[in-house]
Image (cartoon, rainbow, N blue to C red):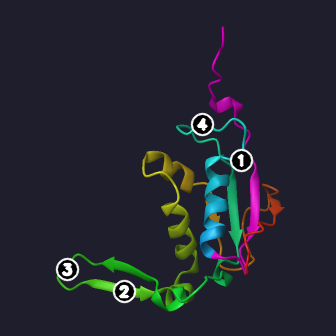
Amino acid sequence: MRTTFITKPSDVNRKWYLIDASDEILGRLACKISDILRGKNKSIFVFNHDVGDNVIIINSSKIKVTGKKMKNKIYRHHSGYPGGVKDIALQDMLIRKPEYVLRHAIKGMLPKNNLSHMILKKLYIYKDGNYNQTAQKPIFIKLKTNKY
């Protein structure tokens, strides 16, 4: 007789990770971070529970993209009024809100349900090297996402 292992909240051991985003490619970095946030790198991963770890990202203003995405990638916002569409290119968005660019990419790689809201609460993004979570003693990991 086989028994199925069901993950309980008491089984989850959450760690804190610190990731430096300088000179990393946006999409590749977002994919790796979303896997860590969901807990896909753990053996107790279940798709319907939040078993992931906390992630702190520093230097988000120094990310890179390939090709012509700096000028061609557009972020759209609508104010709700007629003619209220606002378009902003990636290069301008990296100057104004570099945290939004990375958060938007990671959010797009998470499941589209209520679980993604709980997962995104464990993500902390800073545009420079200063962060507030030193008391948690985060583990610095270097993600090797660069191929170019």
| Magenta-colored span | 1-25
The quarter holding residue 27 reads: bottom right
Residue nearest the viewer, comparing 58 with 48: 48
Q: Residues within 10 Å of mark 4 (few under 14, many from 20)?
A: some
Left or right: 83, with 40 as reference point: left
Q: In the rendered image, which residue does mark 1 sit on?
A: 41
Q: Residues within 10 Å of mark 2 (few under 14, many from 20)?
A: few
Mark 3 or 4 closer to N-term? 4
Residue nearest the viewer, comparing 103 with 32: 32
Q: In the rendered image, which residue does mark 2 sit on?
A: 87
- Quadrant where the C terminus lies? bottom right
**Residue kind at label 2, given as amino acid type:** Asp
Left or right: 18, with 99 as reference point: right
- Local secondary structure at mark 2: strand
**Residue kind at label 4, given as amino acid type:** Val
Mark 1 or 3 closer to N-term? 1
- Rendering coords of residue 8 (x, y %): 63, 28
Q: In the rendered image, which residue does mark 3 sit on?
A: 81
Spatial CA span between label 3 and label 4: 42 Å
Q: In the rendered image, which residue does mark 4 sit on?
A: 46
Magenta segment main secondary structure: loop
